[in-house]
Image (cartoon, grey):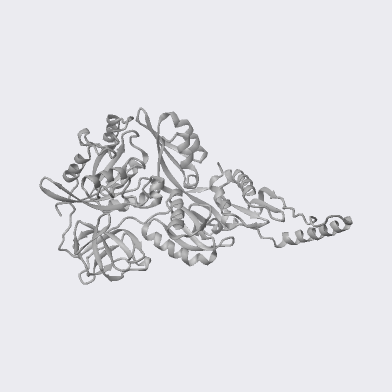
Amino acid sequence: MENIRNFCIIAHIDHGKSTLADRLLEITKTVSDRDLQAQTLDDMDLERERGITIKSHAIQMDYVSRGTKWVFNLIDTPGHVDFSYEVSRSIAACEGALLLVDATQGIQAQTISNLYLAIDNDLEIIPVVNKIDMDGAMVEEVKDQIVELIGCKHEDILEASGKTGKGVQELLEAIIDRVPAPKGDPNAPLQALIFDSVFNSFRGVIAYVKIINGTLKKSDKIKFVNTGKEYAADEVGILRMKPEQRDAISAGNVGYIITGIKVSKEIKVGDTVTLTNNPCATAIQGFEDVKPMVFAGIYPVDTEDYEDLRDSLEKLQLNDASLVWEPETSLALGFGFRCGFLGLLHLEIVQERLDREFDMSVITTVPNVSYYAYLKDKTKIVINNPSELPEPNYLDYVEEPFIKAQIISKPDYIGSIMKLCMDKRGILKNQVYLTPTKIELTFEMPLAEIVFDFYDILKSISKGYASFDYHMIDFRESDLIKLDIKLNNENVDALSALIHRSKAYDFGRRLCEKLKELIPRQQFMIAIQAAIGQKVIARETISAMRKDVTAKCYGGDISRKRKLLEKQKKGKKKMRQIGKVEVPQQAFLAVLKLND
């Protein structure tokens, strides 16, 4: 155990975590030169295409130094705010963290957020200035920012370049010296924390565990403390580029267990694994339960695929523990699931993964957040879907979630950032100059205002320089109303939204205009209306498509044509009574892109 070091790499998005991990794998010869590629640990096509890490990736490396063989368990983590739950789980399996800061960009919002996560878990922090080979590198300035942030000494900060490999050898030596060896007793009753899991169609669920105490051997009878299920450990081993089988893994180490579990509900990330015949006294305090920020309905395009979609979501949840879902029904879309996500990027990634990994075509409804509704009789109910909002005569008031947003940017963009946040009902709480060229703005604002397009607009008005991080603070009373969209006087519940009264008229008008462009014309007139209760606040009309019924008449008396036109007129009247409007998938996504 003295020679084991467990550490993760944390940083803001795009500060070079995966590239540095590549150099560590190369220097420790964990991956052969032939297999090494850019972002080796990012094994999902989606991660490579977007250039971001979505999943945490654990890997074990052997490193020989000072005449001793050291075992490094490295976890490469995502940097985007939507995947901070992955980071919190990785931190639970480590004793140290490399805090990476880009020498060209300095400290960003997510750097601070991930640092606080690591400090809360008592991790040893090793600050590293990365990308020192870049032309715009401001090494000394960035070092000053780090000293101010974590109060370390100048000489404690390491310099490295993930691209060229400069300084990486010194980094490995610093990990040996500074990261503490894991504590634990190999002879105590088994106590292991599940920090991740994946589904393999041949072997079932593979659980990734950090052994806190005891030793886990192949064929041991094990028990999951939270679910109470008991299994035999068919295979145990360590995580290399491909899992490597071992006879046993003991305290302080990170590895995997295969038990042949086929039902994904029976294993839970954050659970404790122990032996059936010699159980541990207490379960490990895992990481806190995930708190979804954004809710959206996911429905199969074909209602017959409902059960397949359920299976796909279960398997995806194993690999992405921050996804939560429950069944729901919609009048417009049939049977589907109400899913909770950590943000809009998370929603986009889940939708993309369902399509690629499980071949599921789905319709996603308008994303919204959770609200608390208080009735006149003082009952409190949670609203995850606008259709759940009680009628106004029963409703007393509604509370919506507020967040504390930290935005770090250059002083040049303060005006436009403040205007954006004020338009989104934000309240400025603080502004601090971190350095003469970097300012931190703190706002309190409703979560509902940032889930659509806030991040994209922020990036464009700051020319890509602003970084953004947020966390929930509380629920506050707001003047919210339910906006219904009606097609030919029928409510489309999948398009309804809870919105602040001051924005309802503008939002309703723009949405009606957008739907007019997207809904195909029918042979009958379609009325698109936005309504608050019974009051219609906006209307657009899609005129009927005219079918040329007189085309077959070539000559003869005018009465023949008139007879056909009269017949068509009657048919159109009947069609309007029973005509159903088909709403394309783009119409549901249109709400997200109203500002384009």
The image position of residue 593, as x and y in percent, is 54, 45
- Residue 277: image quadrant is bottom left
Residue at position x 39%, y 60% from top? 317
Q: On screen, 517 above or below 457?
A: below
Residue at position x 37%, y 52% from top? 44
Evaluate whether residue 293 shows in this view.
no
As rendered, which of 573 and 394 lies closer to the eye? 573
Q: Quadrant of the N terminus?
A: bottom left
The image position of residue 566, as x and y in percent, is 82, 58
Residue at position x 21%, y 34% from top? 153
Evaluate whether residue 109 shows in this view.
yes
User: Residue at the left extreme?
Assistant: 67
User: Residue at the top extreme?
Assistant: 436
Viewed as shown, does residue 355 lie left or right of 151? Answer: right
Viewed as shown, does residue 36 lie left or right of 265? Answer: left
Residue at position x 31%, y 59% from top? 270
Q: On screen, 263 above or below 496?
A: below
Viewed as shown, does residue 192 lie left or right of 518? Answer: left
The image position of residue 584, as x and y in percent, is 59, 54
As rendered, which of 66 and 92 lies closer to the eye? 66
Q: Quadrant of the C terminus?
A: top right
Viewed as shown, does residue 354 lie left or right of 527? Answer: left
The image position of residue 574, as x and y in percent, is 75, 62
Numbered-mark total: 0
As rendered, which of 163 and 181 lies closer to the eye? 163
